[in-house]
């Protein structure tokens, strides 16, 4: 998609702002496919992969599927050379279906249900190069019971977290990873029965420039741990220091300087056996996606102008769940339309179903089309059918073509599973 310029200065290639999307093209897509509609630009996904590759030429970059598991995105990311980090049996299945080789698939088991382990171990028999990361000592026993003796990685809880909201900080949350001080001993105890290939940790999601000291401290601790483990059981193949690289959601937020993050990461890690691995999700897809939503109703209330749109928290959960900020642009407004202070709300019966409150927007009118920025990561992925609202369709753009990659759910789909 050709950037429309967005008025004013040079576009920064590190972020695609909402103003850079071609408004006319988005209006035409909404007209053709209806709303709410997710649009994902695979050309931008490719650019993001290339920038990660350039910043981390000496590391293995693994795409964290949870940000966006759509087949078109996975194939694009695989072709761009990124490996796959999967959080569930379902994500492993999606990675393999998108053409990933088992050797590029990491399964990070978080409190894994037995069914997930059964399935992944089953897949491992056909893909013996697949790696399983455990975050609890008894997951090792559960794998052993299932006959798994393949490539194993231990996730540590390094005791330091980071991220855009406390709900997405994992590095110091006891749910995630083996307690730091227990990792070396666990590594020794598994070394004979498994192929211990790596260590892993993840600080959290949406790391900005302000969080870099925490990221650095996490990596420093992982470097120390890797040296300790290597001295006890021999060299490791990799040290995975997680993902979490943030993107700017607010108009005035600066993009992360990935080269500096990469330099700081290498420096903090120090000398370790094996390669550095990182596993970004958001960075790959966030600014490659927008959500298009139509205005249903405009209501003047005593303390707000409420703009009711057809996308809600079931379409894009982030504002309701994390008070997340997403840029909003009125694509239908002509330049002479005055800005008003608007509260944009969805159609769900929850008062948290609000995309923004009292935000200055070119006055939305019934029928206008709004675009919501940075919707590529954790957008469709966290959508639900709560209130019996079918999930939206998704269109992928690539090399000037647009095609539907996920059809819109129908009312009939909602009862499909009922017996
Ligand atoms: C283990 C793990 N790896 C990678 C990621 C990707 O995070 P992000 O999308 O912020 O890069 C996550 C999500 O926070 C995660 O839990
Ligand atoms: N869902 C979160 C990111 C969490 C990633 C999972 N560990 C978000 O939208 O910001």
Image: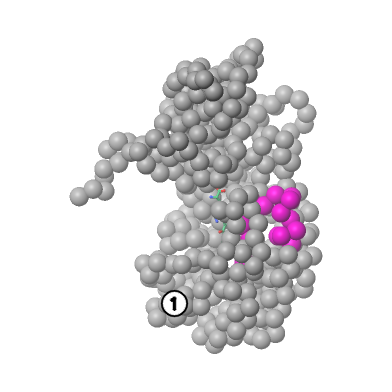
Q: Depth check: give the residue in front, 14 or 99.
A: 14
Q: Is residue 211 magenta?
A: yes
Residue at 70% from the left image edge and 49% from the top image edge = 208
Query: Does residue 2 appear in the picture of this structure?
Result: no
Residue at 47% from the left image edge and 78% from the top image edge = 138
Q: Depth check: give the residue in front, 235 or 161.
A: 161
In the rendered image, residue 353, in percent from the top left (x then y), is placed at: 47, 36
Query: Does residue 388 appear in the picture of this structure?
Result: yes
Q: Depth check: give the residue in front, 371 or 325.
A: 325
The quadrant holding residue 6 is: top right
**What stretch of residues is rendered in magenta?**
200-216
- Horizontal side of 58 relative to 128 (left or right) equals right
Residue at 55% from the left image edge and 67% from the top image edge = 174
In the rendered image, residue 289, in percent from the top left (x then y), is placed at: 56, 39
Toward the left, the furthest residue is 419
* Protein image colouring: one colour
- Horizontal side of 291 relative to 97 (left or right) equals right
For disc 1, the marked residue is 143
Q: Is residue 319 magenta?
A: no
Residue at 56% from the left image edge and 53% from the top image edge = 167
């Amino acid at each position: 998609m050709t950037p429309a310029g967005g008025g004013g200065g040079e576009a920064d290639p590190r972020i695609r702002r909402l103003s850079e999307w071609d408004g006319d093209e988005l209006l035409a897509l909404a007209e053709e496919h209806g709303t709410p509609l997710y649009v994902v630009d695979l050309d931008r996904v490719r650019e993001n992969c290339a920038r990660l590759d350039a910043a981390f030429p000496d590391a293995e970059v693994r795409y964290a599927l949870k940000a966006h598991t759509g087949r078109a995105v996975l194939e694009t990311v695989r072709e761009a050379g990124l490996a796959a980090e999967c959080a569930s049996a379902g994500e492993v299945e999606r990675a393999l279906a998108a053409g990933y080789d088992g050797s590029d698939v990491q399964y990070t088991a978080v409190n894994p249900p037995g069914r997930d382990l059964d399935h992944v171990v089953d897949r491992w028999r056909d893909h013996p190069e697949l790696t399983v990361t455990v975050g609890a000592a008894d997951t090792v026993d559960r794998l052993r019971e299932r006959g798994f003796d393949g490539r194993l990685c231990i996730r540590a809880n390094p005791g330091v977290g980071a991220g855009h909201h406390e709900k997405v900080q994992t590095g110091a949350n006891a749910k995630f990873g083996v307690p730091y001080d227990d990792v070396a001993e666990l590594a020794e105890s598994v070394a004979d029965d498994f192929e211990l290939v790596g260590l892993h940790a993840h600080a959290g999601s949406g790391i900005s420039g302000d969080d870099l000291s925490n990221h650095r401290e996490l990596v420093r601790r992982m470097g120390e741990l890797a040296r300790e483990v290597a001295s006890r059981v021999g060299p490791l193949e990799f040290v995975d220091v997680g993902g979490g690289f943030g993107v700017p959601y607010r108009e005035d937020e600066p993009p992360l300087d990935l080269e500096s993050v990469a330099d700081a990461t290498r420096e903090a890690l120090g000398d370790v056996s094996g390669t550095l691995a990182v596993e970004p999700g958001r960075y790959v897809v966030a600014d490659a996606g927008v959500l298009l939503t139509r205005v249903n109703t405009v209501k003047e209330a005593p303390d707000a102008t409420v703009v009711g749109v057809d996308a809600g928290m079931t379409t894009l959960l982030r504002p309701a769940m994390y008070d997340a900020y997403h840029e909003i642009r009125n694509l239908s407004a002509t330049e002479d339309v005055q800005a008003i202070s608007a509260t944009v709300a969805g159609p769900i019966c929850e008062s948290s179903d609000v995309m923004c409150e009292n935000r200055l927007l070119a006055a939305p009118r019934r029928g206008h089309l709004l675009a919501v920025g940075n919707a590529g990561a954790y957008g469709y992925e966290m959508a639900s059918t709560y209130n019996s609202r079918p999930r939206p369709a998704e269109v992928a753009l690539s090399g000037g073509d647009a095609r539907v990659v996920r059809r819109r759910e129908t009312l009939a789909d909602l009862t499909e599973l009922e017996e």
